[in-house]
Image (cartoon, grey):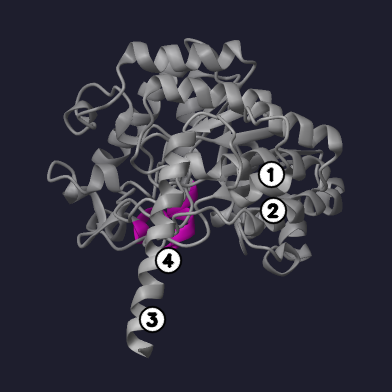
Amino acid sequence: MKFVFLGPGSTDPSRSAPPQPTYFKQLLNSVAELGANGVLIEWEDMFPYEGELGSIKNGNAYSYSEVLDILQHAESQGLSVTPLVQTVGHLEWILKTSNFAHLREISNFPMVACIGDNQAQELILDAVNQVMALHSKIRVPYIHIGADEVYQMGECEADRRVLPVKYKSDKKRLMFDYVRTVAENITLQYPKTKVLMWYDEFRNVSHTLIREYELDRLVTPVVWKYTADLDKDLPNSMWEELARSFSSVWGGSAFKGADGPNTIWNRVKPYIQNNQQWYLQSLEHADLFSDFHGFFLTGWQRFDHFASLCELMPVSMASLAVNLKLVQNFVLTDFDNEIILRSLRCPVETTMTQLLAGEDKCRFPGMLEQIGCASIIDISTNQGLIRAAALMG
């Protein structure tokens, strides 16, 4: 299965720059036509939250009816929608506000929540429950609870208080108990929904500890890596260790947003290398699991919540189209090329070389923004040449 990440407001994936509902649905059309089975959506502060969370949602947040319309449209295109709700780290959209700054793991950094604090747990579960309630109006076979890049843990007062009493001063036990709470909150209400989370917290952890907190039963790991040498970055030992605890696994590649925090143009090549590597990883390690379920092709909009935008979706449509095919075939066939060019509404004379170089005249959603980004790059290049000539002259 191939799922594409589309995050309108989100923390890691598509922090800020939310698409208008009309454009969102056009993207869904393209994603479906290109062969994806579903989309992973992180709403972040663009979700129509109510209650405490409603007081800090984006002023331009989607309405209830707009989200429902997007979900219904995805369903009509044969796309399964998986919500991504961050539950530990990447919670800047909540923790940056004065309302909830006191729930930070470390007071100076608004990334990670103090999960030992009951108020923090209740707030995060409220976010999960509200998203699930709306998504379940259609169907929600999966939910992703994030839990990656948690660099701070056990520092807040509530964590320090509970660690020696309940967790033998082991931060991993604190984390696993919290993840169990979140996962059980979901599965008790929605028994048909499977809970996914990034694999970070399972690296170099004993199978015994994972089983003690029932995470082998409650969650499925998603292994992510956006580099070009996955044999080095995801060694055999990691896969073997993961397979001891989990019968099912997903992979996470990238088609944009992982090539530098200030990158304007999508170079495509790094993502081609990454997705081809993921194809090989699935072949090499699938036998370790009962189910190597598929891939999430992530398209992050910013490197973090406070960073500038990078590689906007319109300049990344070619990368998305190509990599959706490569992650399942490794190479592009003539038939793949035909589907890609047709899906992106390219003139019949367009070549794949032109498409990947951004020299096409395709008319996919957002193509005018792609032209605008190309103009910015031309201006920047010309200014650089002028400055260099002045220095030399």
Where 65 falls versus 35 (above or below)?
above
| Residue placed under numbered mark 2 in the picture | 272
SS for callout 1: helix
SS for callout 4: helix
- Give me the residue at 75% from left, 39% from top: 325
| Residue placed under numbered mark 1 in the picture | 323
| N-term mark: 3 or 2 | 2
Q: Residues within 10 Å of mark 2 (few under 14, many from 20)?
A: many
Mark on residue 381? Answer: 4
Mark on residue 78? Answer: none
* Amino acid type of the residue that numbered disc 3 sits on in the rendered structure: Ala
Where 48 falls versus 182 (above or below)?
above
SS for callout 3: helix
Q: Nearer the viewer, residue 392 or 57?
A: 392
Distance between mark 3 and mark 2 Cα atoms: 33 Å
Q: Quadrant of the N terminus?
A: top right
Q: Residues within 10 Å of mark 4 (few under 14, many from 20)?
A: few
Where residue 262 sits: x, y (%)? 40, 60
Q: Quadrant of the C terminus?
A: bottom left
Mark on residue 388? Answer: 3
- Give me the residue at 46% from left, 46% from top: 177
Where residue 310 sits: x, y (%)? 42, 52
Distance between mark 4 and mark 1 Cα atoms: 28 Å
* Amino acid type of the residue that numbered disc 1 sits on in the rendered structure: Asn
Distance between mark 1 and mark 2 Cα atoms: 6 Å
Query: Magenta residues?
Result: 163-176
Where residue 332 sits: x, y (%)? 81, 43
Q: Residues within 10 Å of mark 1 (few under 14, many from 20)?
A: many
Q: Quadrant of residue 49?
A: top left
